[in-house]
Image (cartoon, helix red, strand yellow):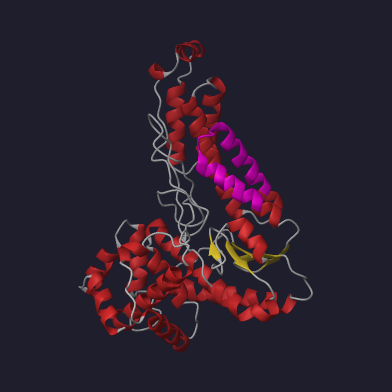
Amino acid sequence: GGGTGAAAARGEPRGGGCAGRGGIFARGRRARGGIRGGEAQDAPERVAPDESLRPHSAASLPAAAAGEVEEEGVDWSARNSEGIEALGRDEVEEAIALFEACHAAVPEEPVYAHNLAEALARAAVALHEAALSPEQRLAAISRLERAVGLDPTREDLAELLNRWKRGAEVEDGFFIERSEHFVLSYDLEREEVRGEIEALDRTLEEAYLDFSEAFTLWPADGGAAPIRVVLYTRAGFDRVTGIGPWAGGVYDGTIRVPVGDLDRELPRVRAVLRHELLHAFVQEKGGARVPAWLNEGLAQWLEEKRPAARRERVERARAKLAGSQLFGLDELTGSLAGWSDPSRIERAYAQSLALVGWIADHYQGGDVQSVGVLFEMVAGCAEGRPVEETFRDRVGLDLAAVVEDMAQEL
């Protein structure tokens, strides 16, 4: 099951001029960076972020607005700064109230409109991620619509809004099943697939336990929102994600998987669910900086629960690479979702799995270990440490040299 595991991060209130395109965080660690487009990361749900919210001084306001500030005895520039500070503390509703006041007092000031749009968008994303019903998702869409109206220059928000609307249309009338850590939605005949849906629930819960122990992380416990999973027809999946037909699934804050005949495809779907759930754990643990080769390699490696099956899969990946030129790791850092050549995509996935398997065999004891170097490399990304640095500190070797060693044995 292919797919994109990925990280999205948030944009910031801005100062001065437009610093670029704004961004929102997605489920998981809120790293700076922004909803990034096409993330095989991960997915089509992400785009580049703004660097900062906009501070503003009364002296820079239009003359009429500055006079209005003086007449009312309210320093809207200071109140705008309070909103920026509130947003920095993740007190989003307080920030919205402050920016709303600024925008209502000086509606012609684009700085206030921009900052209000950013705060509303963050609130919308949080609401959408936690939504357990179509009504809650529609409420999030409504908030994001207002944000887009306030700041039409935010193409990232407009793109996200369109994706949410497509998802709402495609998922209208879906059945919903809830388990301890997941909400599973599907558009299939309920009675015909009842046994298979129960099997998928078990697969998800077992995988959640496996990955929680490996990463020492419990993202849907302690009152956190459950992880959302949606099963689509292939046409519905394509409409919602926009990813090519090569993708067996995607994680963009929600696990999304295309299904035809669930009875016949059950083993594949179970593997894809493990794959995409691993992306959710990587996102939560490592944030936006985890390179695609590590993200996709881990997801493929841990699709298989049994160590013997895991080793067999690594050997098949190595066989696919035999006699071919390997990609440089810099080529496998960003998203694979934007790639279009099926043969290159297949080799990229094979190399990612082969390298993760090589590191596991030579430097991590060959199996899942919560303190292993692979998991330390993921965790280091959240701290801004390149995986090469973490690997060198842990193992004492350059990662590039390890890739060369692997290439020589293919």
Pick the quarter of the image with the N terminus: bottom right
Give the camera-side residue of 259 and 307: 259
In the rendered view, would you say 142 is above or below 135? above
The answer to which image quadrant residue 379 occupies is bottom left
List x then y, in percent, for residue 101. 55, 26
Give the camera-side residue of 11 and 91: 11
Magenta stretch bounds = 138-166
**Which residue occupies the extreme bottom position in the image?**
308
Q: How many labels does the image show?
A: 0
- Left or right: residue 150 compared with residue 372: right
List x then y, in percent, for residue 295. 42, 67
- Left or right: residue 161 compared with residue 196: left
In the rendered view, would you say 80 is above or below 69? below
- Is 163 included in the stretch rendered in magenta? yes
**Which residue occupies the extreme right position in the image?**
191
Q: Residue at x 67, y 50 (%)?
A: 136
Q: Residue at x 49, y 28 (%)?
A: 112
The answer to which image quadrant residue 282 occupies is bottom left
List x then y, in percent, for residue 134. 70, 53
Pick the quarter of the image with the C terminus: bottom left
- Is 195 included in the stretch rendered in magenta? no
Instruction: Assign the magenta stretch its main secondary structure.
Output: helix
Q: Which residue is drawn at 45% across and 71% down?
A: 343
List x then y, in percent, for residue 86. 46, 37
Whether residue 227 is visible here, answered yes or no, is yes
Give the camera-side residue of 18 and 360: 18
**Which residue occupies the extreme left position in the image?**
396
In the rendered view, would you say 82 is above or below 404? above
Whether residue 215 is visible here, answered yes or no, is no
